[in-house]
Image (tube, grey):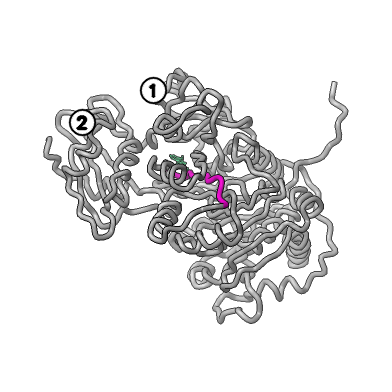
Amino acid sequence: MLGLMQEWPLLCHKIIDHAARQHGNREIVSRSVEGPIVRTTYRELRQRALKVAQMLERDGFVLGDRVATLAWNTARHVEAWFGIMGIGAVYHTLNPRLFPDQLAWIMNHAEDKAIFVDLTFVPLLEKIAPSVKSLKKVIVLTDAAHMPETSLPGAVAYEDWLAGADGDFAWRSFDENTAAGMCYTSGTTGDPKGVLYSHRSNVLHAMMAAMPDAMGISSRDSILPVVPMFHANAWGLGQSAPMIGAKLVMPGGKMDGASIYELLDTEKVTFTAAVPTVWLMLLQHLEETGKKLPYLKKVVIGGSACPRVITKKFQENFDVEVIHAWGMTEMSPLGTLGTMKPEYAGLTGDARLDIQEKQGYSPFGVEMKVTDDENRELPWDGKTFGRLKVRGPAIARAYYGGAGTEQFDTEGWFDTGDVAHIDPNGYMQITDRAKDVIKSGGEWISSIDIENLAVGHPDVAEAAVIGVAHPRWDERPLLIVVPKAGKEPSKDDILRFMNGKIAKWWMPDDVAFVSEIPHTATGKIQKTALRERFKAYALPTA
Ligand code: AMP
């Protein structure tokens, strides 16, 4: 017997309809790429998104066409997203930090037919566009006055293009499993892989993200997604903020400490989210200027492990709650969040920080388990590490074009490639990427734990740990350190600082000082490059 409830497909444009109707006057504030702060509302944004949809159809784009965006977080980018999805086309967010060759490869793989591009990235697109044969239309996200000279064939200024529509348009209707968006993961090895979100998965993910024990956001919040829309939907905020009617504050291309502080202050931001590097820059700015954060209540930190010192400073010096989160492009992206269950809610000081070093627990909609290499499930005892596997309605079941099939099993589990343990209360902690794990005498050493500890040293700006060949132990950890500007910490200094805070056999065998650590386009430490550089390193213990 079937239930007798209405068919109401979970389509993304219903989110912006709801925002315009119930929260029509709520502001979206953007630091525009041209410079000034620009204000709009959900009502106006929806109207302009309808014009985007109308113009795309007029230009011949249809259901299933991939429409790329190469843009910062601004209201224009959000309205382009909703306009693209509203005709059943697929927004494809490109990460401008990738190399031009990689971007061209990705655009060709996705067969992008049109692109919305920010002024900042016009020179980059000029390099790529000639090799993307599918590309028919270039729309520069600016007005006629700011339109640059460009070699991009037929490029139009967004505002001129949009002026051709009257907005008298109805969203198209289709199945909720229709593709809505696309984002490529920038693996450190091999070609990038395309993740294809559906309308249904985006809507479910947005609901999940907003829940009280997930991000816990509401219409009373002023939300600053520093995390870019090209990083897995700005961690879902691109959809969950309009869904719950929160004020949105978009940082454009400026993510330095002073610029972020200015928005936090003038727009009375209560909730923000980004990777640890952004928060290191902000905290440094606050320390240099003596400024405070009177409005900010919560900050979500993820993308890579959040060092304890960041959590401690936010909470103890600024009274801002930190939520450590873990996720992946393949998971839309949220997987776990470190909000407090009653079991941990009463903890304070170091005991609380210990729990917050974990990546948290999964909300409804994410199932997880850890297994050994033979796929046997491991206990939730808070110490047995294994491969972390996940499944759920907003988690990829395949990559676009069929790459990476070995990561998906027949029971629907996706192998994340992360190594983790889960404690009896369900809190997961990542110890490594499977391929980065250090094996010493047959036992695993967590490089993340050592890195987090090392960056707690006052003279250390950044730290990375890799395994280096050792005749007796097979591999031993080498700590690679970038000192803070003007500081010259010694090896003994750093090791003394770490001593007693991790197991003795986890202590690095040596410390190497470098001026810079290489990063991937999503800001993760490029361990492959470090391993290559230090492969012949002679450890003093060898
Ligand atoms: P991406 O798809 O680019 O977001 O990368 C996902 C990967 O980033 C995960 O598989 C993890 O290896 C890593 N990652 C994300 N969040 C965290 C976190 N809070 N702690 C440690 N690693 C993380």
Bounds of the magenta segment: 295-304
Q: Nearer the viewer, residue 384 or 267?
A: 267
Q: Is residue 303 magenta?
A: yes
Residue density around tag 1, few if under 14, some if 14–19, many if 20 or more, within 10 Å: few
Residue drawn at the location 59% of the way across and 50% of the way down:
270
Few, some or many residues within 10 Å of mark 2 (<14, 14–19, 20+): some
Nearest the eye: 91 or 299? 299
Q: Is mark 2 within 8 Å of ligand 1?
A: no
Q: Is residue 320 visible?
A: yes
Closer to the camera in the image, 167 or 74: 74
Mark 1 and ligand 1: say if the CB distance to the nearest ligand atom is below 8 Å: no
- Residue of label 2: 474
Q: Please name the amino acid that badge 1 sits on.
A: Lys
Q: Secondary structure at mark 1?
A: loop
At a point 64% along the width and 64% down the height, the residue shown is: 114
Q: Closer to the N terminus: mark 1 or mark 2?
A: 1
For the question of whether residue 104 can be seen, the reply is: no
Considering the whole magenta stretch, tell me its main secondary structure.
loop
Question: Up-down: is 4 above or below 37?
Answer: above
Say whether residue 474 is left or right of residue 75. left
Depicted 513 relative to depicted 99: above or below: above
Residue 15 within the magenta-colored segment of the rendering: no
- Give the amino acid type for the residue marked by disc 2 in the picture: Asp
- Residue picked out by circle 1: 383
> x and y percent of residue 450 in the render?
30, 37
- Image quadrant assignment for residue 156: bottom right
